[in-house]
Image (spheres, helix red, strand yellow):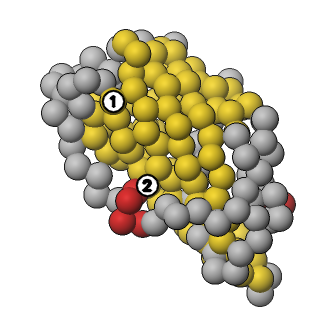
Amino acid sequence: MKNILIPTFLLVLAACGETGSLNLTQVLGIPAGDKEGTALSGTFSTRVSYVNDGCKDFPSLEVPFKNTTEVGNVVIEQDSGNISFKDIQQQPLFGGVYFDNHYEAGGTFTLDRQGDQNILRAVMLRGRFVDPNTFEGNGEARMVGRIEAKDVDCSYKFTVSGIRS
């Protein structure tokens, strides 16, 4: 199994494809929740399904098309109300997990491809743990930047599910 890169957010200024409303303040500095313990920590086998083609006008971004599903692994670390999802879109996502088992995590990543493609990705993932061995969620990613003198601003959505492996 390969490590899944959960879609990350690229922000680009001129719009082709779907433009999202996700911004940096939403994905950075998400506070800890009120959950206790470390029971949610572990490695999970995952399925990531893409639900729209928001970045199809920018094939060099290599965002999978709608109805594509990828399988892989994600490492989740819980430290009381803090949670992180590792090996997701080449970036960790950090956030909070709550007493009712819902979570919210986000992060950013900068891509520099061949010197003329500078893209910022932001990802937000929200969902819940069905039990300590199973989670599900919905994500949104936005990518903004420039590719070969062309402004990019596109976003896409995905769903994710995982089971402890």
The quarter of the image holding the N terminus is top right
Residue drawn at point x = 77 percent, y = 83 percent: 150
Q: Is residue 160 visible?
A: yes
Which of 85 and 155 lies nearest the eye of the viewer?
155
Residue drawn at point x = 25 percent, y = 23 percent: 100
Which of 39 and 11 lies nearest the eye of the viewer?
11
Q: Is residue 32 above or below residue 49?
A: below
Q: Nearer the viewer, mark 2 or mark 1?
A: 1
On screen, residue 144 versus residue 103, left or right, reads: right
Which numbered disc covers residue 107? 2
**Mark 2 closeness class: few <14, some 14–19, many ≥20 residues within 10 Å:** many
Residue 24, given in percent of the width and then of the height, sits at 42, 66
Residue drawn at point x = 24 percent, y = 31 percent: 98
As shown in the figure, which amino acid type bears the numbered disc 2?
A: Gly
Q: Is residue 42 visible?
A: no
Which of 103 and 110 lies nearest the eye of the viewer?
103
Residue 146, given in percent of the width and then of the height, sits at 69, 79
- Residue at the farthest bottom position: 149
Q: Quadrant of residue 95?
A: top left
Callout 2: helix, strand or loop? strand
Callout 1: helix, strand or loop? strand
What is the CA distance from the residue labelled 2 to the residue labelled 1? 18 Å
Which numbered disc covers residue 102? 1
On screen, residue 105 versus residue 154, left or right, reads: left
As shown in the figure, which amino acid type bears the numbered disc 1?
A: His
Asked if the residues shown at circle 2 and circle 1 are in contact, with their CB atoms under 8 angstroms apart, the answer is no
**Mark 1 closeness class: few <14, some 14–19, many ≥20 residues within 10 Å:** some
Residue 105, given in percent of the width and then of the height, sits at 38, 44
